[in-house]
Amino acid sequence: MQWWNDLVDWTQSDAGWRIISGAIIPFIAIVVAGIVGAVIGRGVTRRLVAQRDHETRASAVTALIQAGQDAAKWHSQSAAAKEHAAHLASEADVMVRLLPISGAGLAADWATHQLAEMRTNSVSYSYAADQTFSEYRDRLVLWLHKPGKGKRLFTTDLQRWRYDDQGPDPLVVEQQKWAEEQVTATTHEAPEHAASLPVGGATTALPAFGTSPAAPAEKAAN
């Protein structure tokens, strides 16, 4: 107890107070200021990093949405426009896959499937393609703002598609044939893209307009 009394007497003395006010208090103030500055700096850094990640992801999502707009009107584009759109879609796919964000690969795989579906549905002159594009755009925007929820939805869709091995929709095939007939009646030439129809990321061979599936076999027989 005596040491405590001696300490109190020392702090109340002129020499003790000079040391406390000239050294101890400034030291404590510097330490506290350093801690507060570190906490503030850490928070600012986190916000900057989060903002940068959001901007990068937004840029990638915007590129995918632009690719979706091109896919929704795929059937009405020229060969050069299709080539350019396919190049932009490929760049957007790579951009998304390189994002250091959980679910980026799933988002790219999901977008690839949906782009192929929109290109297929574009033969119906925009209704089915526009309907798919609306869902495509909304899902990507959801992933932009809520990556966790978007990732779960992407996973669910990809698993469902993995076990859903269906051939081309007969209605879509008939719509494509009708569209090709309109182009042929107008230009008197078969459209260049009549040979194939992308379905779900694959290509389904179709006979060119004016021929039947049995034509190659008959020619070989002759």
Image (spheres, rainbow, N blue to C red):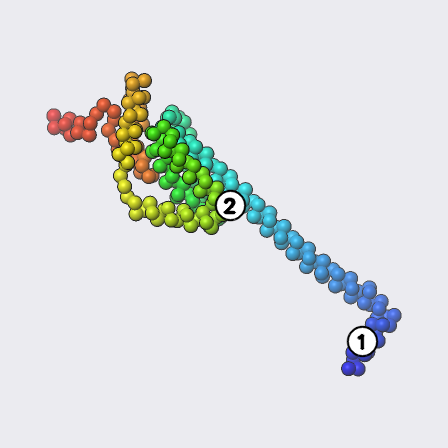
For badge 1, the amino acid type reads: Leu
Element under disc 1: helix
Quadrant of the rendered structure where residue 90 is? top left
On-image quarter of the N terminus: bottom right
Q: Residue 149, how many percent across, how many down?
A: 46, 49
Element under disc 2: helix
Most foreground residue, 140 or 77 = 140
Q: Is residue 172 above or below residue 34?
A: above
Q: Residue 154, how many percent across, how many down?
A: 41, 46
Q: Residue 180, how many percent across, how many down?
A: 30, 24
- Mark 1 or 2, nearer chain start: 1
Most foreground residue, 144 or 214 = 144
User: Which residue occupies the extreme right position in the image?
Assistant: 14
> Can you identify the residue that label 1 sits on?
7
Q: What residue lies at 32% left-to-right and 21% top-to-bottom?
A: 183
Q: What residue lies at 51% left-to-right and 39% top-to-bottom?
A: 59
> Can you identify the residue that label 2 sits on?
145
Disc number lying in front (1 or 2): 2
Q: Residue 76, how many percent across, how many down?
A: 37, 26
Distance CA(mark 1)–CA(mark 2) = 59 Å
Most foreground residue, 208 or 133 = 133
